Amino acid sequence: MATPANNPHLPFGDQRSAPWYGKDILSVRQFNREDLEYVFAVAHEMRTMVERVGTFDLLKGKILANLFYEPSTRTSSSFVSAMERLGGSVIQINEVRYSSVAKGESLPDTVRTLECYADVIVIRHPEVGSAATAAQYAHKPVINAGDGIGEHPTQALLDLFTVKQELGRIDGLTVTMLGDLKFGRTVHSLARLLSLFKVRLNYVAPEALRMPSGLIGELSAQGLDQSESTRLEDVLPQTDVLYVTRVQKERFESEAAYEAVRGSYVITPDLLKKAKEEMIVMHPLPRVGEIAMEVDQDPRAAYFRQMEYGLYTRMALLAMVLGKA
Ligand code: ASP
Ligand code: CP
């Protein structure tokens, strides 16, 4: 049977000159439309291979260091799954308090240590710019799995892959981002990626959690069609992608400030009666009440499928930076 490594029809192979070989993935700003087509093509092949054989040896012998300074379920375990489905293995540091970080070891030293043992480092950290700092000190590729309120580039790539798979196109869509647009790093990355397409972006948030004006300015300078509102009802009927987010409790200065905005928006089956028949509801997850569980049965609820697309996207990214795609 053909394996990905020897099948010339698949975008796999030992191509040390591959454009992403050895590169860090720190921000969505690194990607243009052509790059996105490439990521989606590789992710699509990964899906085919997982469905056909489950696990295969494209990254056999390669080791990933999964360094998480903040909680995670999906990003952490999908990178583990991605590496293992590609035949590689993982050094998992989920709770840095059990590592030498608890003794005061710095980020640069932690990264320099892990790269002695691994071929690629995935990092999630509470500070904006932390992944870039890690990359400055590492010789091996560093992948940003969320740097505070900064970016979550692999999430945005899987989000866009989800839109493409579910709706078949990105140009021409109306995307509505809802919830905590101030602290939500996923929407910061996704809005930047969407600015490469001809889309309309609606931002719906409580006054205190509006999309940062600097980011809106950056994207309008690129010609992106954006609007802001506090009322979902104003834009829901025209929406093709409703991207719901959690209010990021851990980023607030006080419990009172969080309580003042929590539960501002809740998606219910009743509310979705006002939405198009052909649209999707996405959420990076975890949800903490923004989408009622009764919505899960609606075929437009794409958030669980979105998680699965994340596996294929992360398999693609690992293969790319390790020179096998
Ligand atoms: N899991 C996503 C993140 O880490 C979204 C969230 O936590 O609300 O950014
Ligand atoms: N979407 C996301 O990043 O989920 P986790 O925080 O569980 O990794």
Image (cartoon, rainbow, N blue to C red):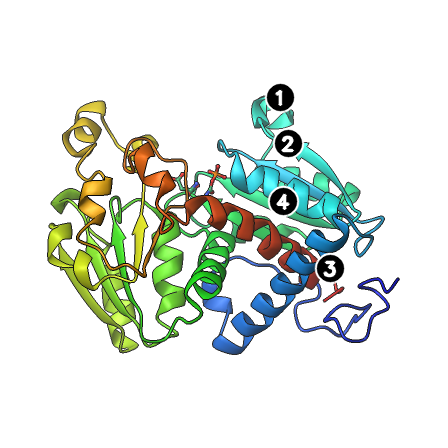
The residue under label 4 is: 79
- Looking at the image, tell me whether mark 1 or mark 2 is earlier in sequence order: 2
Asked if disc 1 and disc 3 are in contact, CB closer than 8 Å, the reply is no
The residue under label 1 is: 98
- Distance from disc 1 to disc 4, alpha carbons, whole Å, reads 20 Å
- Residue 74, x across and y down, in percent: 53, 39
Q: Amino acid at mark 3?
A: Leu
- Residue 234, x across and y down, in percent: 11, 57
Say which of 238 and 71 sits in front.
Answer: 238
Say which of 324 and 5 sits in front.
Answer: 5
The residue under label 2 is: 93
Asked if disc 1 and disc 2 are in contact, CB closer than 8 Å, the reply is yes
Indicate which label's residue lies in the foreground, 4 or 3: 4
Indicate which label's residue lies in the foreground, 4 or 2: 4
Asked if disc 4 and disc 3 are in contact, CB closer than 8 Å, the reply is no
Circle 2 sits in a helix, a strand or a loop, which is it?
strand
Mark 2 crowdedness (10 Å alpha carbons): few <14, some 14-19, many ≥20: some
Q: Amino acid at mark 2?
A: Ile
- Looking at the image, tell me whether mark 4 or mark 2 is earlier in sequence order: 4
